[in-house]
Amino acid sequence: MNCLKKYLCWGFWLTFFCSCSNISSETSGDIDIVGAMHNLSPIRLSEIADNIVYVPLETNDSCLLTPYNRVHVTEKYIIISHHSPTKPAIRVYDRYTGKYLHDIGYVSNDPWGYASYSRRVNYWVDEMAEEVYCNNWDQSLQVYGFDGKHRRKLSLLYDSLQVIGWCGNSMSFSQDTIIVYTEWAKQVPRIVTFDKGGNLLQSYSLPVRRMEGTEKSRTTLTLARDSIFGSYTVYFHYEYFDSPHCVFMAGDAPRTYTRNGNIYLKETFVDTIYTLQDGKKEPYLTFNMGEYLWPYAKRTEGADDNRLCVLYTLENDDLVYFTCGQNIYDIESENKRFFCGYYDKKKRSTRMMRGVSFEDDILHGPPFRIMGMNQAGEFYTVVQPGELLEMDTEELSPQLRKLQQSVAEDDNPIIAIAY
């Protein structure tokens, strides 16, 4: 009888660990990468949205924007970054008219200012509280309202260390929770959650662990800058240790997101999306990688042309959007291959295509590269005026023809919102 109990116990734990495995699952999966990769075809914008609007941002001397922008679209506002060697900023525009409203705070060493780094400002948007969080010089956070006014300084501490680094998407928000991804911090990588007052709530270990090595033995080499993650400004990071191994990191690609009060986690080299609750990780959706599997144990190897990793996901009520990469360790960028696709949650079907730009078959505008998704489930991206001016007028919808005639090459960007 005792022997039988032992076998039953071992069987239970074996089943548990297999079902909760977060690394290179070989189950059939919910999201069929294998089938979609064997049937690649262009994806049109009308497959993921019914409508699209183009909002040209006001252009004048007080609100000029550089071409490389991080943007967040909310119910009422467009919040967008201005990169500058002398005066980087975060600017707020009316979502419907594109009118410039004001800046969010300012770069300064004074008690109300925030920090800048490499011509940019790191910021995170809490749509529900209508607040913007910015890095401070001491790695604490400065919090501002959407009206641009300073509200408070906030320190998020775990094991007496600040958990915020310079990673562009290391934070996300739910109604009453701050979710911090700490991969870039010096402590053990993990997800840490806080209430809006900065009080620690929960801690979750991460599926992907750093390789062994000391701070002195590790250096980071930035090899390229690209926009393969939709319009995310991304740096390819290769971290070298005492051994010749390296690990791919995508600085600005989101790791966590929230939807309907739930917290979700998706990491590179992990074929599972997890829900996080009460200190536990639970599998939510898995990717059927099949022949394209890039095992976690081989994450430092980059010579296999067929190996594919899912880089990040976004989700609304209808679908899960994702991007994938092959040959991501290849220094020659032309040898890299990137794909995007979506999983239709109602039909339980998966579509993929080569590249990351959808054809705008609604208003026949420039290719739509998804930059992000807001709490309402709307997709958005940045369109430079030159992209619209280069298009054949006869192919544009009447609405975009009118817009094409009204913009100039050096105007501020146009924000496209698909819903």
Image (cartoon, rainbow, N blue to C red):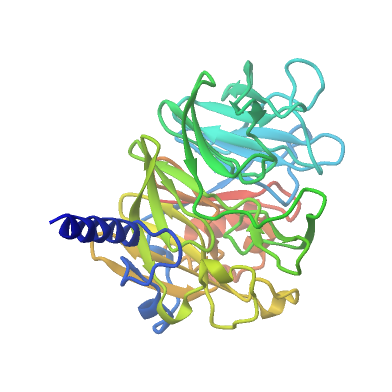
Relative to residue 359, is residue 118 drawn left or right? Answer: right
Left-right relation of 27 to 216: left
Residue 184, quarter of the rendered image: top right
Q: Residue furthest front?
A: 2
Residue 206 in sight in this render? yes
Where residue 222 sits in the image (x, y, percent)? 78, 59
Q: In the current view of this chain or complex, which residue is farthest to the right?
A: 86
Q: Is residue 2 above or below residue 298?
A: above
User: Residue 283: percent from the left, percent from the top?
Assistant: 34, 53
Q: How many marks?
A: 0
Quadrant holding the N terminus: bottom left
* The residue positioned farthest toward the left in the image shown: 1
Q: Residue at 71%, 53% (x, y): give it.
A: 408
Using the image, determine if residue 121 lies above or below residue 405.
Answer: above
Depth check: give the residue in front, 64 or 2.
Answer: 2
The answer to whether residue 58 shows anywhere in this view is no
Closer to the camera in the image, 149 or 320: 320
Query: Residue 143's x, y, as percent?
Result: 61, 23
Query: Is 119 on the left-hand or right-hand side of 195?
Result: right
> Does residue 285 sit above or below 101 in this rendering?
below
Residue 295 relative to residue 63: left or right: left
User: Residue 9: where, in percent of width, then height?
Assistant: 23, 55
Q: Residue at x 36, y 50 (%)?
A: 316
